[in-house]
Amino acid sequence: MRALFPDITEAVDAAYASFAGEPQQAGFDEWLDQQVDEVLPGPASLTIQDSEAAARFDAAFVAAKTAAGLLHATVPEIEAFAEAGVDLDRLAAAMSADATLTPVPAPHGLGANKWIEAFDSLDSPKLVIAEDAAREFASLDLAPAPSSRVVKVGRGAGPAVQWTLRLIPSAPGPSLLGLSFAHGPHVTLSEMLMLQLMRHSVGEPPLDATSFTWLAGSLAQGRLAARHVYDATERAIRITCREVVSQGPHLGARPAGRLIGNLGPV
């Protein structure tokens, strides 16, 4: 926002300079952001025709930016996904048909420690990763498999973190229950954890309090797969593994095979 009003910010910075006014400058930045939010449309409103869907996109990206702050990461702006070729209006149409779908920009390739530290910074929930999942975490830390619907852009500096944008079913439990791992496609671990952090940022309860969600990526040479659950008693999100043939009334999938926007590595 400071970049939008360089003349004003330069004058105010100069006025505060004599006070070494770091707190004052931070306060000015916050005030300026609030004013701009009131008079300018959200980024999604500039690219998505459906006003209701645009508002949901804007809210999701605000929550995602808060979540990314816990990961010491930066979410690409929604315009970056649009410029990379993602058809946001198609995503908006899917959202209009299914109110449970949430746009989730997710980073892949951060590693387990970043996620654990992010959840450790919260009062709850914490993140607990079982040993067999931790051992092969790299297999769970991958972006969705490339397809004709995946758009890629160039490589940037720093660690190779790959961002994707997909619509994730965010009902309390999986939309498809009683299924083995073979019945996908499945949400990735990063998408599920990002969604949980996004929900925490707006005061919404964790998902999977009474269910398990299969996560993409097989382990142990294809014999095992990871699953996600929220343990309300321990106030912890647990990532555990089961054989891919396992199934039960509370185990299922959140199919996330919608249009993908892939901005990695960045």
Image (cartoon, helix red, strand yellow):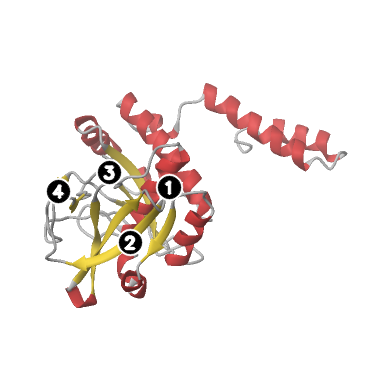
How packed mark 3 is, by other alpha carbons closer than 10 Å (few <14, some 14-19, many 20 or more), is many
Q: Mark 1 sits on what residue?
A: 197
> In this orientation, which residue lies closer to the viewer: 264 or 257?
257
Foreground: disc 2 or disc 1: 2
Write the residue at 12% across / 61% down: 182
In the image: residue 100, left or right of residue 112: left
Q: Position of residue 48 (x, y in %)?
A: 33, 31
> In this orientation, which residue lies closer to the viewer: 242 or 19?
242
How packed mark 2 is, by other alpha carbons closer than 10 Å (few <14, some 14-19, many 20 or more), is many
Q: Are marks 2 and 1 in contact (CB under 8 Å)?
A: no
Spatial separation of the CA atoms under disc 2 and disc 3: 21 Å
Write the residue at 25% across / 34% down: 95
Label whose residue precedes the other's in the sequence (2 or 1): 1
Spatial separation of the CA atoms under disc 2 and disc 4: 18 Å
In the image: residue 21, left or right of residue 5: right
Q: Mark 4 sits on what residue?
A: 177
The relative height of residue 214 versus residue 63 in the rendered view (above or below) is below
Q: Position of residue 134 (x, y in %)?
A: 36, 71
Tag 1: residue type? Leu
- Report the disc number at residue 239: 2
How packed mark 4 is, by other alpha carbons closer than 10 Å (few <14, some 14-19, many 20 or more), is some
> In this orientation, which residue lies closer to the viewer: 138 or 244?
244
Spatial separation of the CA atoms under disc 3 and disc 1: 16 Å
Q: Mark 3 sits on what residue?
A: 167
The relative height of residue 56 versus residue 132 in the rendered view (above or below) is above
Spatial separation of the CA atoms under disc 4 and disc 3: 19 Å
Label whose residue precedes the other's in the sequence (1 or 4): 4
* Label 4: which secondary element: strand
Foreground: disc 4 or disc 3: 4
The relative height of residue 184 versus residue 195 in the rendered view (above or below) is below
Choose top left, top right, bottom left or bottom right for residue 214: bottom left
